[in-house]
């Protein structure tokens, strides 16, 4: 049932991401519309974090004569918050930089006003933007905007915004780490799966979650590799990375919550039964409910923020609710495991439960804690802190869980083998 639950969420996320999501900034193509600019006091185009002395914006137009007739221009703001109370004219005049669209192609150097990278918001406006009661304002303008930061040699050739700098190399390292781990541990893991045991189902689910994580890292690397060259990347690969991560998150939530509550609810009825995934209807319902809520919040978050990054810094309502859910789940698992450990007499089982608690709580708490800690960093560092930190912490969590479920010295394996031999 868990597979059907997250499979449905994956399908919905795929169709939404495939048909709606766009690559954020860097190379932007689209249409300037006077009616959209008039409705919102300027048509919002994108955001980009420029840095260095040679940051560059290049625009290209298809119909220059129409742009000149409409007095079209690009407006660059360093901060759009707090400007909503201004009139249209005041809002337009508050732009830090105004670029008249009067040529088929134009290169504009972006001035740096601070030591650290600053976000610039790009909007489109024309002479119809602040005029009420007019028609459509003439024809639409097809455009392309290329946003470039200086590379290591100071040349404006880097398509990555400042908050994404370095993630390409990080994902390469993650992919190589997964390949190395697969070469070393794939055979022992496969042998453990063939042997079976009370934790066979857990190992299968955990392995699937790890494969989804590896798929997410590989998709992100492919997307960013192409992005480094053209500023567009492979948008559907970025969407696929988010889908894989969302499926992995739902899979892990269902496994950890069902396993943990199943132990607790079955403990009083079958105290001598070896540790295994023996979920009751109540624990299964709780795990399915938690997975469904998390899947719905992940989907809602994607509708609110279509940028391609799996671990958002969560300025949206859906993001905050998702963080609150993970904190609540961490506290719930901690409380359940504390109750289980307190009533356990076996020292070996206590060690097993303690290790399981560490891995589970780390999985759920790492994202909320890192988002909270990221506020002390500069704007261009926050996404990298959250992304790198969550991937590393969840990888450590997976290693802890694998060590528990694969180790042959724990009581649950010996007890299962003893019970099977006695039954035979």
Image: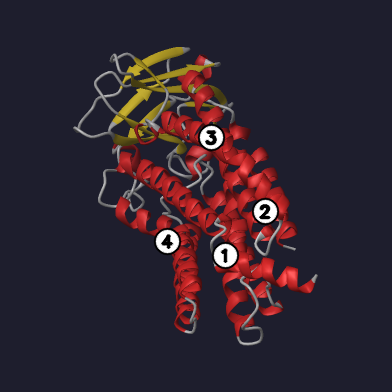
Vertically, is 305 above or below 272?
above
Q: Is residue 42 left or right of residue 214?
A: left
Q: Is residue 338 left or right of residue 291?
A: left
Circle 4 or circle 1, nearest the eye: 1
Secondary structure category for the residue under label 2: helix
Give the residue drawn at x 51%, y 15%: 65
Q: How many marks?
A: 4
Looking at marks 4 and 1 on the same chain, the residue that comes earlier in the sequence is marked by 1
- For the residues labelled 2 and 4, the Cα–Cα distance comes to 24 Å
Are dots 1 and 3 in contact, CB under 8 Å? no
Residue 277 visible in this rendered orientation of the protein: no
- For the residues labelled 4 and 1, the Cα–Cα distance comes to 13 Å
- For the residues labelled 3 and 4, the Cα–Cα distance comes to 23 Å
Give the residue drawn at x 69%, y 61%: 197
Label 2: how many residues lie within 10 Å, few (<14), some (14-19) or many (20+)? some
Circle 2 or circle 1, nearest the eye: 2
Looking at marks 3 and 2 on the same chain, the residue that comes earlier in the sequence is marked by 2
Q: Which sits in the foreground, 359 or 254?
A: 359
Give the residue drawn at x 61%, y 87%: 268
Are dots 2 and 4 in contact, CB under 8 Å? no
Name the quarter where the C terminus is drawn.
bottom right
Residue occupied by mark 2: 204
Tag shown at residue 305: none
Residue occupied by mark 3: 220
Q: Picture coordinates of residue 22 (x, y %)?
A: 57, 35
Secondary structure category for the residue under label 1: helix
Looking at marks 2 and 4 on the same chain, the residue that comes earlier in the sequence is marked by 2
- For the residues labelled 1 and 3, the Cα–Cα distance comes to 26 Å
Q: Picture coordinates of residue 252 (x, y %)?
A: 58, 58
């Amino acid at each position: 049932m868990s597979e059907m639950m997250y499979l449905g969420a994956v399908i919905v996320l795929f169709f939404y991401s495939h048909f709606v999501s766009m690559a954020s900034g860097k190379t932007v193509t689209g249409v300037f519309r006077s009616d959209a600019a008039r409705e919102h006091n300027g048509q919002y185009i994108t955001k980009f974090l420029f840095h260095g002395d040679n940051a560059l914006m290049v625009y290209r137009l298809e119909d220059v004569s129409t742009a000149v007739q409409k007095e079209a221009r690009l407006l660059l703001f360093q901060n759009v918050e707090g400007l909503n109370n201004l009139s249209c004219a005041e809002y337009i005049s508050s732009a830090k930089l105004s670029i008249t669209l009067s040529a088929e192609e134009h290169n504009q150097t972006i001035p740096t006003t601070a030591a650290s990278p600053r976000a610039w918001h790009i909007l489109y406006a024309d002479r119809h933007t602040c005029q009420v009661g007019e028609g459509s304002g003439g024809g639409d303008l097809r455009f392309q905007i290329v946003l470039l930061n200086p590379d290591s040699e100071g040349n404006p050739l880097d398509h990555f915004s400042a908050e994404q700098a370095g993630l390409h190399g990080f994902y390469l390292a993650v992919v190589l780490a997964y390949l190395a781990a697969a070469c070393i541990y794939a055979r022992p893991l496969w042998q453990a799966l063939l042997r079976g045991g009370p934790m066979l189902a857990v190992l299968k689910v955990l392995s699937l979650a790890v494969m989804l994580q590896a798929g997410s890292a590989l998709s992100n690397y492919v997307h960013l590799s192409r992005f480094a060259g053209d500023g567009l990347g492979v948008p559907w690969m970025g969407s696929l990375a988010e889908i894989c991560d969302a499926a992995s998150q739902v899979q892990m939530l269902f496994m950890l919550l069902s396993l943990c509550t199943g132990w607790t609810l079955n403990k009083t009825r079958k105290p001598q039964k070896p540790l295994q995934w023996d979920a009751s209807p109540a624990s299964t319902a709780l795990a399915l409910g938690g997975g469904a809520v998390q899947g719905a919040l992940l989907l809602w978050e994607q509708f609110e923020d279509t940028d391609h990054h799996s671990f958002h810094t969560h300025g949206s309502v859906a993001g905050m609710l998702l963080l609150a859910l993970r904190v609540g789940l961490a506290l719930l698992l901690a409380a359940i495991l504390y109750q289980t450990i307190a009533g356990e007499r076996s020292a070996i089982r206590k060690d097993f439960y303690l290790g399981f608690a560490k891995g589970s709580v780390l999985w759920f708490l790492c994202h909320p804690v890192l988002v909270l800690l990221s506020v002390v960093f500069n704007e261009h560092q926050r996404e990298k802190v959250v992304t790198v930190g969550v991937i590393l912490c969840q990888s450590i969590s997976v290693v802890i869980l694998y060590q528990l479920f694969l180790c042959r010295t724990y009581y649950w394996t010996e007890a299962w083998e003893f019970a099977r031999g006695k039954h035979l």
